[in-house]
Amino acid sequence: MEARVGYCPSQIWRSLMSVMDLIKTGLVWRVGNGRSIKIWKDKWVPIPSTFQIQTPNKILDCNATVSELIEDGSKTWKQELVQAIFSQEEAKSICSIPISVKGMGDKTIWGLSEKGIFTVKSAYHADLGIKNQNMGETSSGDQSKGLWGRLCRLTSSGKVKLFLWKALNGILPMRSILFKRRVIDNSTCPMCSREEETDIYVLWDCPAIVDVWGEDCSPVRKWGRNFGDFTTLWSELQSKLEEGKLHIVAEVLYGLWRRRNAMVFEGKFKGPCVLIQQAVKDAEAATLAHEKPRENQTRPVEVVRTVWKPPSQDYLKVNVDAEVDSKRGKVGIGIV
């Protein structure tokens, strides 16, 4: 856990080290004999917020271990000492921890799952929670629900919605992120080579992007450039634009990201006028495709019943059926 990236590490090692802080956040101690766990420095209390003791130390040494709180003979907690040192909530949590009767050693486990076993799902939710704390939560939970709700209701294609979801969660593979993870050595925007490539810069502030948003058919032609991040920009777009214009903006954003990738990996560059016109066409096509199924659903379905009738006089009716068995190489025919 104390390892470092080192000199010229492999890509796999870089990736592992990039999530080391997250791993350390979820690792806690499972009490065995308590000799390896420091009371005030390690994570060992079953309180999910911090897993650490918050009560100030007034009696024991600052480096005291959990073993000093356990009776050697009976392998039980020294309840009077625990209650004298810690707050009522912490004392109750400590006394609820089972102690190894056989005196087994302490063990580190993953504290963010019920079974103490690491899962990618629990790590993902932990990382998402840390990011939300760092960014600051919105003043109202309804705003967040409205943000995702309207995104899901867009008539844009699934790939456009997935792109927007990634942008709002800050997981687009931009150079600023790749640079922080030590995947690349340069975080400068590949479009203009002026500033660091962030989500808001590559989709809104870059001079090459401003030309696109300044086109005549752009719904946000006269908008300013004073948005701190992409989430703030998208919230503003949702609050001020009607559905049709918001669909166009969504298609333009996706087109901008595709143009950026085409230039980086293929050396191709699409002009502002061509890009935004294509986005308008894609938005109209998506809206039309979304409305057609609704029209078909509203039409009444005619149910036609076929009733057997005997043949007319002087006619014979023959019913024929056949079956082919390709494995056995046989054909069966029935005539009635």
Image: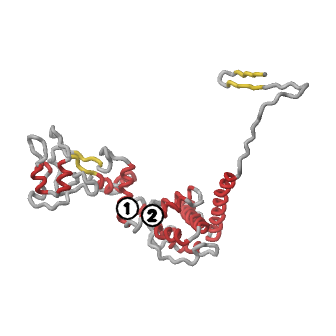
Query: Does dot 2 land on a helix, a strand or a loop?
Result: helix
Residue 308: % across, % down: 78, 31
In this rendering, which labeled residue sits more in front, label 1 or label 2? Answer: 2
Q: Which residue is mark 2?
A: 144
Height in image: 228 above or below 156? below
Q: Residue drawn at (85%, 28%), measured in percent from left and top?
A: 311
Q: Quadrant of residue 260?
A: bottom right
Q: Residue drawn at (50%, 71%), measured in percent from left and top?
A: 236
Looking at the image, which residue sits at the far right? 314
Q: Residues within 10 Å of mark 2 (few under 14, many from 20)?
A: few
Q: Nearer the viewer, residue 287 or 39?
A: 287
Q: Which mark is residue 96?
A: none
In what quadrant of the picture does the C terminus appear?
top right
Residue 125: % across, % down: 38, 54
Q: Quadrant of residue 229?
A: bottom left
Visual colour scheme: secondary structure
Q: Residues within 10 Å of mark 1 (few under 14, many from 20)?
A: some
Q: Which residue is mark 1?
A: 131
Going by the numbered disc 2, the residue's amino acid type is Ser
Q: Nearer the viewer, residue 153 or 130?
A: 153
* Distance of label 1 from label 2 (alpha carbons): 15 Å
Count of number-bearing discs: 2
Height in image: 20 above or below 314? below
Query: Does dot 1 land on a helix, a strand or a loop?
Result: helix
Q: Of the residues under marks 1 and 2, which one precedes in the sequence?
A: 1
The answer to whether residue 217 is left or right of residue 206 is right
Q: Residue drawn at (71%, 25%), measured in percent from left and top?
A: 323
Q: Nearer the viewer, residue 221 or 59?
A: 59
Going by the numbered disc 1, the residue's amino acid type is Lys
